[in-house]
Amino acid sequence: MPGVGYDADMHIDVVPNRNSRPAYLLRESYRVGDKVKKRTLANLSSLSDEQIAALRIVLQGRPLVPADSVFEVLQSRQHGQAMAVSVAMYRLGIADLLGSRSSRQRSLVLAMIAARIIAPATKLATTRWWHGSTLVEDLGVADANEDAVYAAMDWLLERQDSIERRLAKRHLPENGVVLYDLSSSYFEGSHCPLAKLGYSRDGKPGMLQVNYGLMTDVRGCPVAVSVFPGNTADPSTLMPQVRRLKDDFALAQLVLVGDRGMISGKAITQLRDEEGIDWITALKSGSIRRLVDQGVVQPGLFDEHNLFEFDHLDYPDERLIACRNPQLAKLRAHKRQDLLSATERHLEPIRQRVKAGRLSGQDKIGVAVGKVLNKYKMGKHFQLEIEDQALRYSRKTEAIAAEAALDGIYIIRTSVKAERMDDADCVRHYKALANVERAFRTLKSVDLKIRPIHHRLEPRVRAHIFLCMLAYYVEWHMREAWRELLFADEDQAAKRRRDPVAPAERSDAALAKIATRKHNDGTPIHSFATLMADLGSIVRNTCQPREAAANSAKFDLITTPNTTQARALQLLEGIKPTAATQM
């Protein structure tokens, strides 16, 4: 063909496809006069990525040589997860928090913090696991054994007060809001003086446990943790935290937020003597019932607004903010009806057995009835008559109606003046305690596995819990940085605009994430655990040319991150520890 040049250039073009794999086309470039044109010779989309890569090498005129004939892989270690956590710890300055000077103990603690996030386990299991990762190699502690780890825990505990003072300086501004709550974890063994029988928040009654109180900023970013014997009551832990806030953390003005069990009436009496300390809590159901009986709080008062402020002589120099959530009221009414029906459904067979003479005696009947009442917690709503040969039960309709009148109603109690914080923000800050509860769930669940506690010595238990808190501090920042990649609501500023009483609602963008489970580019949306698992596919291979002399010419080759992995690592580079913006 006249004018057509046949010094053609063959190459592979990639044609994007919105919802699936791109199309790969073998094309040839040729000239027509002064113009360069292309024609498609074949569709290569059915070939694998490896086959397409091989064709590219051939088209470039390079020889194809089997990789294993050139070099051999001597060792492969997981690298992506360790790299991600290491980047986060570097951006947060964890090493400097632990100690200004580099030391073996500091490196071991860094390794334990990272390991707790990546693969939480006992200290012995950790020292066996981390040799398959680049974690200890990069930190220079690959030879560490269990004894070295325990020594590093002792070293860490000696520095806890100093570390927490630095964290408080970072995240607790003067005149800011501090959240505090208490939880517990069960204990394996019986020799630790901290291990006591108490109220189990793990649902394991009868097991020894250890209590620990977590202090966070209003976002739930952890600042300090205190450990107590397992039989310590919540309110008794409060004033030591106040002393730490004022004396150790040098905060002259602050607002302390705790639940109704933590900031009790006795605690409030003590807080009134603490200059500069304001507090936010809530009334217990008995106190709310008395206000309803007095006519101070009436359902009709919520007809136009779902919250209102009032004063009461029983609460001098305090603000009371009554709130009513209709959705919560419906949920509680439905749950109560289900429990009442379930209680009757299980009491009736017992009554029939008594009537038929198969069960007799007040003691035996009482034991059978007690099991049902303990299971459903509805004993207060039933009138029972137990005789040797008879059982009668009926609902206490008036008591049930009185409780139903309180459905969906809660009352915030606070010493904060209105000019400092309005009603809506008082409610928002009390509900922010959910951030501490979320921290406890993360600490206890598969993420960090603070429980069960295996250590026998009290200092080791304290060091273990502090180590888990530091791991959560790093993970909390990683989660914040990864919001766009996770099933998380990215519109955090909207929380300040939402109705504080109404149930929390996700943004449209967050709902779309849940519905589609994919980003616009088709990549999957992750949980924190699955994203960490995905990063685990990045490995560091130690290679060596096959014809090289022994122990020479070794080199490392790291897996190239995919799009999601690269974005995750990029987002971690933007981590910066900051104080919470006050509402």
Image: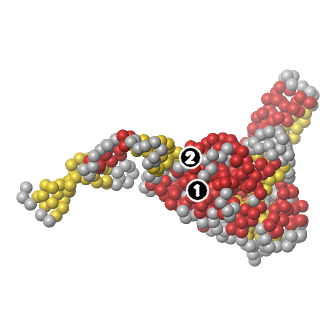
Residue 405: % across, % down: 79, 55
Work out which residue is located at the far left of the displayed protein and give it. 2
The crowding category of the residue bearing disc 1, from other C-alpha atoms within 10 Å (few below 14, some 14 to 19, many at least 20), is many
Callout 2 amino acid: Ser
Residue 164: % across, % down: 74, 62
Q: Residue at x 81, y 46 (%)?
A: 457
Label 2 element class: loop
- Distance, label 2 to label 1, CA atoms, is 12 Å
Work out which residue is located at the far bottom of the displayed protein and give it. 419
Q: Which residue is mark 1?
A: 86
Left or right side of 550 for 416: right
Left or right side of 367 for 143: left
Quarter of the figure that contains the N terminus: bottom left
The residue lying toward the viewer, choosing from 150 and 299, is 150
Q: Using the rendered image of the protein, determine whether residue 132 is visible from the camera's viewpoint.
A: yes
Tag shown at residue 133:
2
The crowding category of the residue bearing disc 2, from other C-alpha atoms within 10 Å (few below 14, some 14 to 19, many at least 20), is many
